[in-house]
Image (cartoon, helix red, strand yellow):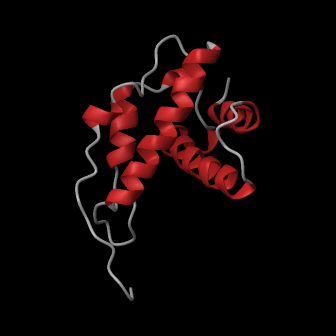
Amino acid sequence: MRLMEAAILFTVTSGRINTPQSRRSFLKVIQHLDKWAGGEAGVEVDQLTAHDLTEWCLSERTRDGGPSAPSTIRNRRANVRSFYSWAAWKGLVETNPAAELDWTVQPGRGSVSSHT
């Protein structure tokens, strides 16, 4: 099953995402992962490894090439962990590649700059 198809199924059946805004936010994060991993063609759910997920969570995505904000990294990590936990429960993946993201992805500490 394609990653985006599974993500849409997750938003409908998991019971974890209740509002339209949180659904859009979740799908946007997974769409970024899908494009990062497979380009325009996308990727299958079971093709991503723990190393791939760790690399994506920590990848730079700012306009100036700097590191991602800690809140962005935490958001990516939480969404991927939740999605792959559900995918493993549903049998879409044999083992959960996101199971160790709490140890492999350390977002660091940062503060929000006001008036930016």
Quadrant location, the C terminus? bottom left
Closest to the observer: 86 or 29? 86
5 with respect to 61 (left or right): right
Q: Residue at x 60, y 47 (%)?
A: 31
Residue 114 placement (x, y as % from top left)? 35, 84
- Pinpoint residue 25: horizontal percent, then vertical percent: 61, 55
- At which x and y percent is residue 101? 34, 33
Q: Nearer the viewer, residue 57 or 18?
A: 18
| Residue 16 sits above or below residue 76 on the image | above
Residue furthest to the bottom: 115
User: Looking at the figure, which quarter contains the N terminus?
Assistant: top right
Q: Is residue 22 above or below residue 56?
A: below
Q: Is residue 101 left or right of residue 2?
A: left
Q: Is residue 103 above or below residue 33?
A: above
Q: Residue at position x 67%, y 43% from top?
A: 17
Describe residue 90's horizontal placement relative to residue 58 as left or right.
Answer: right
